[in-house]
Image (spheres, rainbow, N blue to C red):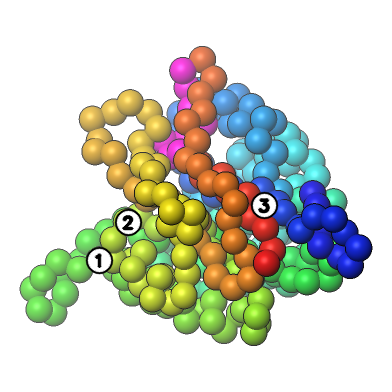
Amino acid sequence: MADDRPGSQYPFTFLACTYNLWGEERWEDRHAPLRRFLEVNRPDVLCVQELTLTARELITNTLPWLKCVDDPFPGWTEEGNIYWNGDVFELVEYGAEDIGILEEARRLFWVRLMFPTGDTLVVATAHFTWLWDAGPSGEWVTVRVAQAETAVRALDGVVQLGEPVLFMGDFNGYLYPIDVLREGGFEDSFHALGRAPQITHPAFPTSESPTLLDWMMHRGPIRPTLTSVVDFYVDGVPPSDHKPILTTYVLT
């Protein structure tokens, strides 16, 4: 970690990751690759979707300095959570916003973290619904558009003036929901660096069509310096059916 306090030589940078952990599917095959992924990459901020109690225990045991939200609402243990390096960040507050996601325990999860400089950052994650619904005009529209619109409004209500925000997760799309987030002032890590977004699903070789489902987006005085969709395997087995995104951010 570098910091940007007066007299510091370098700006404050940190490594962030978003990862859909695929629930309990093929867990016996995947837990060792997931552990190794964490040991190798050691993110300072980690947003996860399709979390389980066993995966939560693995993350805590592998990187014990990572802290996460501990709350009785089941969404924090059964759907998503946000991890942060407790040696670097201090938790200020957190919340779970209902943005119309159809799965019962899914929310827009967010935390406000304090840097060593005293500045704060909002980190949020969501897993939009994979479902298509017919609109009143008869055209097919995605419920994820409404979820993205509500997510922008929810974050507008959480984020303070001039505060950086990261919003990442499995948005289950690459067109309309992403356009909505961009209209809300968010930029994805790839376009910010002049690169084309990369395929994030599937990680396992299957007959499914490759597509972009996972994103890391930012707004405010923060920018990415490096970003990548990671192909990671141990003995040919990936940690999930999704590929993670790793991005290094710097406060501006």
Q: Nearer the viewer, residue 134 or 222?
A: 222
Residue stretch in magenta: 236-243
Residue 171 seen in render? yes
Question: In the image, residue 123 lies at what x, y percent?
Answer: 62, 64
Task: Identify the disc placed on residue 173.
Answer: 2
Precedes in sequence: disc 3 or disc 1: 3
Q: Nearer the viewer, residue 201 or 73?
A: 201
Q: Secondary structure at mark 1?
A: strand
Residue situated furthest left in the rendering: 138
**What amino acid is labelled 1 in the image?**
Thr
Q: Residue at 10% across / 70% down in the picture?
A: 139
Question: In the image, residue 16 lies at what x, y percent?
Answer: 62, 50
**What amino acid is labelled 3 in the image?**
Val
Task: Identify the disc placed on residue 45.
Answer: 3
Whole-number angstrom distance, CA of label 3 to CA of label 2: 23 Å
Whole-number angstrom distance, CA of label 2 to CA of label 1: 9 Å
Q: Which of the image's four quarters has the C terminus?
A: bottom right
Label 3: few (<14), some or many (≥20) within 10 Å? many
Q: Nearer the viewer, residue 190 or 80?
A: 190
The answer to whether the residue labelled 2 contacts the one labelled 1, judged by CB atoms less than 8 Å apart, is yes
Q: Residue at 36% across / 42% down in the picture?
A: 199
Precedes in sequence: disc 2 or disc 1: 1
Q: Secondary structure at mark 2?
A: loop
Q: Which residue is mark 1?
A: 142
Label 2: few (<14), some or many (≥20) within 10 Å? some
Instruction: Check residue 181 for magenta coloring.
Output: no
Q: Residue at 20% across / 68% down in the picture?
A: 141
